[in-house]
Image: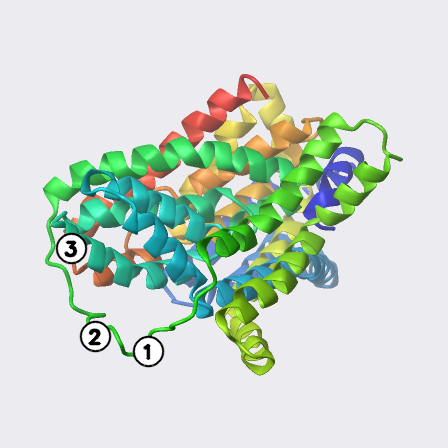
Amino acid sequence: MYAASGAVLAADVELPEPVAPGWQLILAALLGIAVIVVLITVAKVHPFLALVGGGLTVGIVAGEAIPDVLKSFTGGFGTTAAGVGILIALGAMFAKLLADSGGADEIVDTIVGHASPRMLPWAMALVGAIIGLPMFFEIGLVLLMPVIYLVARRSGLSLITVGIPALAGLSAMHGFVPPHPGPLVAIDALGADLGTTLALGVVVAVPTIVVAGPLFGKLAGRWVVPPIPHTFDADPADGVTTKRPSFAITIFSVLLPVVLMLGKAIAEIFIEDDDSIVRQILDVLGTPIIALLIAVVVAMFTLGRGSGMDRDTISKATGAALPAIAGILLIVAAGGGFKQVLVDTGIGTLLADWATDANISVILMGWTLAALIRLATGSATIATITASSLMLGLVDGLSSGELSLVVLAIGAGSVFFSHVNDAGFWLVKEYFGMSVGETFKTWSIMETILSVVGLIVVLLLGLVV
């Protein structure tokens, strides 16, 4: 299944009964997670292999036959790859066109160029959010670093004061807003509606970015003042694309899939007649795969041809986007396999029964599980996969809006306190030329603020959704 149809599935299908006593299933889940954590953090095994090992551990310790465990794992792997994997691939193609055409540079130059020195941190937060909407965090960071250096040097502001807002925008989009892998995995696993989650994700992201970005960045810029690196200094005439798509065309291309998916969600709320022609058209256009496919095709003309690329160059650009995300696709699909093993052993049913008896908030539980797994593994995607898998039995009967809030709570927990086991920690450290301690005082605290403020906003939305 993919996210658009998942809400029906989650509400209508009963979870399997536990295959073993409660203590054995909890032991199986804990050992499976422990295997993943140890393999990733201690043995330095690729997360794909760690998830395979964790899934096998859960099934075997729970007492299932190995053929049954393999059937569960491969079934979950295939289903996830078929739904989420396609969306990630299309998103990567779009991001590559945005970068190679100069469209991303056009967004940056236009917004930053019209900002006063006092407003520069706010402009950088906006740039980070817009660039982060279609791009993976690592890609967006690499793309923005030359701009962060240049803006800091010209404005005289601290590199941290300028850089933290951009990082907050990138990270918030990565944690809260599809089509990033984390939110997509949680949406798919819990059966939430993608359009509703996207809309609420933007609502959560805005105040979260404001607090963790410009406001915290101003404070952190006083604590840490690293020298501005000269990594990207070069002759301005070297390799600069002379023709770019306009700012308006670029923004149109970036927001097109967002508008299509939001249109579907709005139609479901305000057009009650399922047979309405308008409702049917919006349903089709807003289906995630269709929306992103349309966006990629449109971007080939607006961004590709609009920047002077020929057909061969456009083809090479979209093709070059796929090898870079092969590892991400395998991790996400293996996470789907791990999830299915947990589901088929009945662990989700068991946790649901316990949570019901204890009257624990599903939003708070989702955030806590994701935060703990994030601390242990350093991976936001692994945290989202595992937490959403464990939450399956707890979301029965929730409305579409409530399901989306659980997804966003898990997303908030998945970015909690990045530290030395997170590749992003070292990426930021090296690009900003900071020590480990300085990275903790800036990047790690920013991620924690992002996570906690995100949870608070989700809890407040829970009062009205």
What amino acid does circle 1 point to?
Gly
* Mark seen at residue 174: none
Count how many numbered circles sit on residues in the image.
3
The image position of residue 397, as x and y in percent, is: 71, 26
Distance between the Cα atoms at labels 3 and 2?
A: 15 Å
Q: Nearer the viewer, residue 268 or 442?
A: 268
* Mark seen at residue 234: 2
The image position of residue 201, as x and y in percent, is: 52, 37
Judged from the image, the secondary structure of the residue bearing numbered disc 2 is loop
Question: Residue placed at 61% from the left, 50% from the top?
Answer: 257
Judged from the image, the secondary structure of the residue bearing numbered disc 3 is helix
Choose the circle earlier in sequence order: 3 or 1. Answer: 3
Question: Residue placed at 69% from the left, 55% from the top?
Answer: 289
Q: Are marks 2 and 1 in contact (CB under 8 Å)?
A: yes
The image position of residue 43, as x and y in percent, is: 38, 66
Instruction: Note whether residue 21 is visible.
Output: no
Give the quarter of the figure containing the C terminus.
top right
Instruction: Note whether residue 105 is visible.
Output: yes
What amino acid does circle 2 point to?
Ala
* Mark seen at residue 239: 1
Binning the other alpha carbons within 10 Å of mark 3 as few (below 14), some (14 to 19) or many (20 upward) gives few
What amino acid does circle 3 point to?
Arg
Judged from the image, the secondary structure of the residue bearing numbered disc 1 is loop
Binning the other alpha carbons within 10 Å of mark 2 as few (below 14), some (14 to 19) or many (20 upward) gives few
Q: Nearer the viewer, residue 351 or 434?
A: 434
* Mark seen at residue 154: 3
Distance between the Cα atoms at labels 3 and 1?
A: 22 Å
